[in-house]
Amino acid sequence: MGLDEYAPLAIMPVLDDGCDLDLMERRTGIRICSMERAIGRREIVDDAGVDDLIGTVREEVLEGLRRAPRSSWAALSPYPAETFPVFAGELGIPCSCPDWETFWWFSDKRNLQGGLAELGLPWLPGRWLRLAGSRYSELASEFGRRFVVQLALGVAGSGTAFVESDASFEAAGRRFDGEDVWVAPYTGALSFNVNAVVTRGGTAVGYPSVQIVGQDALLGQRGGHNGNDFSAAAPAPQSVVRSIREQTSRIGDWMSETGYRGFCGLDFVVDQSTLEAFAVDLNPRWQGSTSLQTMAERRQERIPLAAAEIAYQMGVMTEGEVMGLADSFFEPLEGSQVFPKNRRPGRWQASGVVEAGIYSPRMEFLRPALRLHEITSPGELLVSSGIPRVGRPVAGGMTLLRVASTESAVDAASGELHPWMRDAVGRLYESLALRPVSEDP
């Protein structure tokens, strides 16, 4: 939501479903083809599993394509897929889609570290090893009592573990058995995420957001992505914000030299004793923060970075025009979002109805809504993004919905949710009234 006011979106194949999508279709006229709706449940889909999407909703998409001549269509995927370009090619539709080989290469932390070394940018001191050949006491003496263990590849914190004791070290050892892992010091709770567009003529960088990770109130796994907060980033030291922009720009230009074009994102951690920012993850795709940024930019009547990227990929905007907007893309934004999860194992289903729209601070439904700019008063909240339908099974670990606000949701220094957001999420869980699905023997 937000992009639809800049790009003529007509058909959207998506993984999840939710009662908010009914409102979206009625208001926008966009046809939404949902994998969850087709198979009757919300399941965890890994990176390669995204390729199953087009196969699952193919006939529904084809039916929608019959509305207009083939020559009027173009296809765009912000995420890599093999089947999507093939499908578009069969229909003779131009398609923009990242390829898997490029995606995996840039997603690999080892390649990012090589790029940082080549560019002379700071990188978090650490080393690659296998936990089976080490002991907690040895690594604690090198990296400090608390340190971070990461796989070369991981999504939304899936390849990250925090170690602070013999017990957590042993748990990480079981989890990453036989894998090479990167071990580095824990720098503190403050981390940032940023979106950017890589062009031949430079890299346009969006304003960074504070990362919200591992929140118990959201049933998030430790180190897992639970949301983003642009409002919390505004008071951050400007030296940190400028460093993030400069480093992102240089990393984007390094990507451009390899031939990469289009959207990317970076995660930074900040050493809270020195305020030095370190790039730790490179995401060659749209990110969890991209939709919030788009809605926040629309609310402030600015051209969204994601809309400019689509226009650039489709040849509607030149690289010069994109880079001409670079300073406006980096202006501060207002907005936050959190993603309540269903962390428990097994399948669960909502037994209570939660409507898509604007809620009061005490989570009283006020009016239907889909976009951040429909918030009109301080303290109001927007609930949307795949709200579970009553009785529809949802797998453990899945995101349930999004709660967005124009206010800051997290204390940047501590990484903890503000009490009002914790209370709002608690009320939402109560309203959803999740119940375990009885398995048929």
Image (cartoon, rainbow, N blue to C red):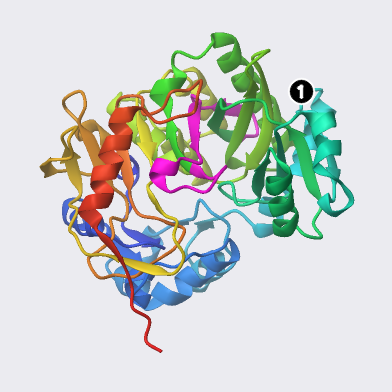
Q: Is residue 291 above or below residue 85?
A: above
Residue 101: % across, % down: 71, 57
Q: Which residue is mark 1?
A: 122
Q: What quarter of the picture does the N terminus occupy?
A: top left
> In the visual, does 231 lie left or right of 324?
left
Total marks shown come to 1
> In the visual, does 73 lie left or right of 25?
right
> In the visual, does 246 lie left or right of 143?
left
Residue 160: % across, % down: 65, 46
Residue 118 falls in which quadrant of the image?
Answer: top right
Residue 218 falls in which quadrant of the image?
Answer: top left
Residue 390 falls in which quadrant of the image?
Answer: bottom left
Q: Residue at x 44, y 69 (%)?
A: 346
Residue furthest right in the image: 133
Q: Which residues are magenta?
A: 199-225
- Which sits in the foreground, 249 or 371? 371
Kind of residue at badge 1: Pro
Residue 78: % across, % down: 50, 51
Residue 247: % across, % down: 67, 23
Q: What quarter of the picture does the C terminus occupy?
A: bottom left
**201 drawn magenta:** yes
Q: Residue at x 37, y 37 (%)?
A: 337
Label 1, secondary structure: give it: loop
- Which sits in the foreground, 223 or 263? 223
